[in-house]
Every structure is written in C-alpha cells, then in structure tokens.
Amino acid sequence: MEFRVSVIMKKTLLSLIMAVMAMGAVAQVPQFSSTEFEEWLYNNTHIDLNATNILANKITLYTTSTGVTLTLTSPAFDCYAGQTLDMSVIWVTDQWTNSNFVMSKVELTAALLDENGVTVDSVTWKPTSVNRYNYLDLPLNINRSLHSARLRFAAWKADVSSCGAVRQISITSSLRGDVNNDKEITVADVNAIIDVIQGGVADDGLMTRADVNRDSEVTVADANQVVDLILR
C-alpha cells in the first residue's frame, strides 16, 4: 500500500494530464503471406516475390557464396515508444535432414529499422530443435520514439546448406505497460501490477501484460518501468 501511494504522489500533476490522454488505437502493422506481400522487399533479384514462390518456400534467407545476405523487409508502418510487436513466423527449413545442415545457422533475426534504415532493436530466434516447419514467436519492444519503422528479417549465419524460407509473418501490436488492457498507460496500470504482486487474482493474460520487462516474473521493477513509460 505504501508503494502505491508513493507512486501516485510522485506524479500527481502528470497523472492529471496522462489519465485523460488515450494512447489511441494500435497502429496497423504489415503482414506477410501468399496473399499479403505488397510493398515487402526481397533482395534476391533471381526470385520474384509472388504467391507461388512464397507457397513454394522460395523466399529463402541466407548468405550467398559472394557474401550477399538475402533479406526480407516490410513496408514502413507507424509506431511509437511503448508499442510491443508480437510476431508469429512460419520458418521453413527444407534442408533440415541434410547431412550438411547446421542447426545454429538457421537462427532468424527480426530487426527494427528507423526512417534511415538504421537498426534500433532486434530479436533472434535461437533454435534448440528444428523441423521442416517451425512456428516461431518473436516479441519486439519499441524502446524509442519512432514515427515510422520497417522490419527486416534475415538469417545472418545461414548458408545455402543451412537456409530457411519465410512462409508467413503474422504481427499483432499492443502497448507495453498497458496492464489493464484499456489502450492507454496510466496510474491504473501501476496499481494493477501492485495488485498482482500482493496476490490479487490474475489470469494468464494479465500476468503476461504485468511482466512488462519480460523477465518471467512480476515485481516492483515492472511497476517502475510503467512509471518510466508514463513519464517519458
């Protein structure tokens, strides 16, 4: 209870403003599949980006013998600090039974690029096992104030014997720190975390949202991170 009061006192004036300032609807983010690939860029000049080639697993990502890294880049989309991108990717490793296949080489990286194409954050899937079809979950937090960004997918270590193909990318977006799921970040979200810490009833969805720093536990550190998002 003392922590709850101290947080509210810490930002009494700011909360009067922030409590009525909705963060707005979540920005539309790009999707990728055999029916949704317009404006995506594939830098392999030998393969057209079309429905047939996507379904045939020809959108492969690897480093060629001449040192060119094949990448798949999304169209630009609106974004903002505090937004979380939850990416579900179908990553096909056709060579997974090949004797020359190296599992570590199919690590898939999704990089967040700013307006100038500079990487500002990234997340990498590091496999402990693989199959032909791999269903990956790649969460990415936007930690700085970007107005527009792109996503670039690459398998930096892969070669022709250990490559993978992107079949589908489904992306949903939410607000990191929006613990009570009301589309804004306010003192109420801090209080929701404190309720969880003090043993309040919480379903799986609330527990996931309350773990703001994604360290697999809900602590005062998560509440402090929400305060930082409000004060930003």
Image (spheres, helix red, strand yellow):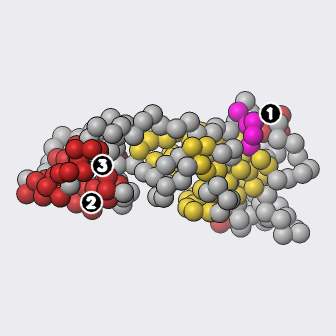
Q: Which residue is mark 3?
A: 210
| Residue 50 placement: quadrant | top right
| Residue 64 placement: quadrant | bottom right
Q: Identity of the amino acid at label 1?
A: Ala
Instruction: State which tag comes first along the sequence, 2 or 3.
Output: 3
Instruction: Give the class, few, some or many, for how many residues have Cα within 10 Å of label 2's Cα (few <14, many ≥20).
Output: some
Q: Identity of the amino acid at label 3?
A: Ala
Location of residue 175 in the rendering, given as x and y in whole percent from the top left corner: 41, 44
What is the number of the mark on residue 224?
2
Q: Secondary structure at mark 1?
A: helix
Q: Residue at x 65, y 63 (%)?
A: 118
Q: Which residue lies most toward the top here?
A: 35
Q: Which residue is mark 1?
A: 51
| Span highlighted in magenta in the image | 36-40
Disc 1 versus disc 3: distance between alpha carbons? 39 Å
Q: Identity of the amino acid at label 2?
A: Asn
Quadrant the C terminus occupies: bottom left
Taken as a whole, is the magenta stretch helix, strand or loop?
loop
Q: Is residue 182 magenta?
A: no
